[in-house]
Image: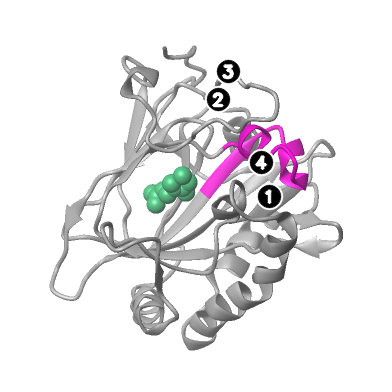
Amino acid sequence: MTSKPTWVDVQEHVLTEDNLRLLLDNRIAAIRIPSFASPSECQGFAAAAKKGNMQYYNVSDRIGYIGLAQYQYRWTRTKEEFLADVPKARADVEAVFADSFNPLQRVMDRLRAVWPHPVDFARESGLAYFAGIIRSTSDKIDLHVDWAPVNSPDYAIGAIDGQLGWNFFAEELASGGHTTVHNSPWEPEVVPGEIPKSYGLDRSLVEGAPNLVYRAKAGDVVIFNTRNPHEIASGTTAPGGSRVSIGSFIGRMPDSSLVMWA
Ligand SMILES: O=C(O)CCC(=O)C(=O)O
Ligand SMILES: [Fe+2]
């Protein structure tokens, strides 16, 4: 069943304080920062990423990543194991930054320039989360949501009241690779003590809902509200090419500060 649409229009907007608040409140569909990086920065980042410590979730879908994703830990590993793995993940992405440039720092700077409250890494018992996961793939990513209050209620990020995802695209596919965001904000039935499945969601959840399809254009950053079910289309690559991106989540805490994690 779809839930009530919340957007006032189905368009991409520019980054301002008001638009960031509207996106956190799920009132607009997306924010794009065009020409966030130059063509040579994009090439440098994509080349550095391909030389980096790329890992794969499994062999069947070739979704490569550098860094870590907190949600990989939520069913099978402890919070302590998650926090212990952060320094290595950070070193792996910092090696790529050292070889090219640091899109994570640049995004933080852009957010700090418009948001009147603190913007920083999320923290758990004083320790910083990891942010800035690098991905490289031409495969599709199935319909899913990222919404920490339901996905990760026992973590500090479970306290947020809005969740966004930003992605910087360093290299795009020859065709395909676009992202569809469906404005049917996730409201699953939550059984106490159980975390509902948030990946490979049923299409009935989004049928008839307004959607925005955005293009992963190299050089741009796109930000959207990840409580909306979203999916990425597969595509075709140029020789040696891939969809190379880096991103993280941005959550709004009860004190209006923004916290970042991947
Ligand atoms: O790469 C994209 O366009 C979106 C990736 C995604 O699922 C997310 O940022 O939550
Ligand atoms: Fe996502």
Look at the image and say whether residue 160 sits in the magenta stretch: yes
Mark seen at residue 152: 4
- Cα separation between marks 2 and 1: 18 Å
Query: Please, what is the three-letter code of the amino acid marked with disc 4?
Result: Ser
Q: Distance between the residues labelled 2 and 4?
A: 24 Å
Q: Choose top left, top right, bottom left or bottom right for residue 151.
A: top right
Disc 1 within 8 angstroms of ligand 1 (CB): no
The question of residue 182 being in magenta is answered with no
Q: Foreground mark, 3 or 2?
A: 3
On screen, residue 219 above or below 212 = below
Provide residue 229's location: percent of width, then percent of height. Answer: 43, 31
Instruction: Please say if 186 is above or below 89.
Output: above
Residue that numbered label 2 is attached to: 27
Q: What element carries label 2?
A: loop
Measuring from the top left, give residue 165's x and y in whole percent.
53, 47
The three-letter code of the residue at mark 1 reads Val
Q: Mark 3 points at which residue?
A: 189
Q: In this view, does 142 lie above or below 126?
A: above
Secondary structure beneath dot 4 equals loop
The CA distance from mark 3 to mark 1 is 36 Å
Amino acid type, residue under disc 3 in the picture:
Glu
| Disc 3 to disc 4, C-alpha distance | 15 Å
SS for callout 3 = loop
Q: Determine crowd level at label 3: few under 14, some 14-19, many 20+ residues with C-alpha closer than 10 A.
A: few
Q: Which percent across, then down, holds residue 21?
A: 65, 35
Residue positioned 81% across, 35% down in the render: 254
- Image quadrant assignment for residue 233: top left
Label 1 belongs to which residue?
114
